[in-house]
Image: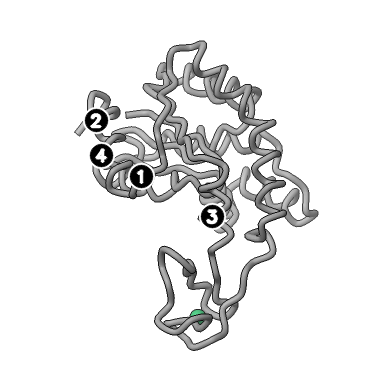
Amino acid sequence: MRVVFLGAPGVGKGTQADRIAAQYQVAKLSTGDLLREAVRNQTALGLEAKRYMDHGKLVPDAVVIGLVKEKLADSSCVNGFVLDGFPRTVPQAEALGSALASKGITLDRVVNFEVSREDIVKRLSGRRSCPKCQATFHIDFAMPKVEGICDRCGESLVQRSDDRRDAIEMRLKVYDEQTAPLVRYYQERGLLFQLDGAGTVDTVFHHLLRELAPYRTT
Ligand SMILES: [Zn+2]
């Protein structure tokens, strides 16, 4: 199974990627994890990526694609992978396509998680985080036992600056501008599956299973 999950921040695709990875014993690949792992292992690409990150710069596509390519050769990917949140742009999608083609493989499916703007703002703006132990809560969906206090360590909870409404709306706008062409790109190639991401985690997961089961390798 070789699939890509697309979707704005807050649509819940990371949670679903974890569950699909466990269900079908495929690797979940996210660029954040790949970068952290490469930096930690001090691989050639990891060291290169670190030079950009240390200067607060974006890691170039070529480096990220290199990391994805390296990972595909890993035994963890023997049954396939779920790419979570990558590619984000058409040039990245093209580079990914070439990297896969050089290994004689293609993507099976690209799932686009659709959640209304209003729901995303509600999900993200309700998040509260613990500045001490990094635990996260939600004022509607995952309330702490005592309002405003971390269950785990007793610290006062805060709203991270990028979870404020105006910051969320900016993130969504940037996401839409970057990703709308990507959705079209995969649609034109007959790979796109539009998934209604508005239901509960279990409901969304069952829709996904139905769609992805034909591609399982285990
Ligand atoms: Zn805490």
Q: CA distance from mark 4 to mark 2?
A: 6 Å
Name the residue carrying label 4. 206
- The image quadrant where one finds the C terminus is top left
What whole-number distance in Å separates the C-alpha atoms at marks 4 and 1?
10 Å
Q: Quadrant of residue 8?
A: top right
The scheme the figure's colours follow is one colour
Residue type, mark 2 in image: Arg
Amino acid type of disc 3?
A: Lys
User: Label 3 vs label 1: CA separation?
Assistant: 14 Å
Three-letter amino acid code of the residue under disc 4: His
The circle drawn on residue 122 is 3
Considering every residue shown, the one lying at the far bottom of the view is 154
Q: Which one is nearer the viewer's eye here, 190 or 63?
A: 190
Label of residue 210 in the image:
2
Q: Are marks 3 and 1 in contact (CB under 8 Å)?
A: no
Mark identifier at residue 199: 1
Give whichever of 133, 120 is nearer the camera: 120
Q: Earlier in the sequence, mark 2 or mark 1?
A: 1
Measure the C-alpha gap from mark 3 to mark 4: 23 Å
Q: Say if disc 3 is inside 8 Å of ligand 1.
A: no
In the image, 197 versus 64, the foreground residue is: 197
Which of the image's four quarters has the N terminus?
Answer: top left
Rendered location of residue 183, percent (x, y): 55, 23
Q: Which of pointers 3 and 1 lies earlier in the amino acid sequence?
A: 3
Amino acid of disc 1: Gly
Q: Mark 1 vs ligand 1: CB under 8 Å? A: no
Q: Secondary structure at mark 4?
A: helix
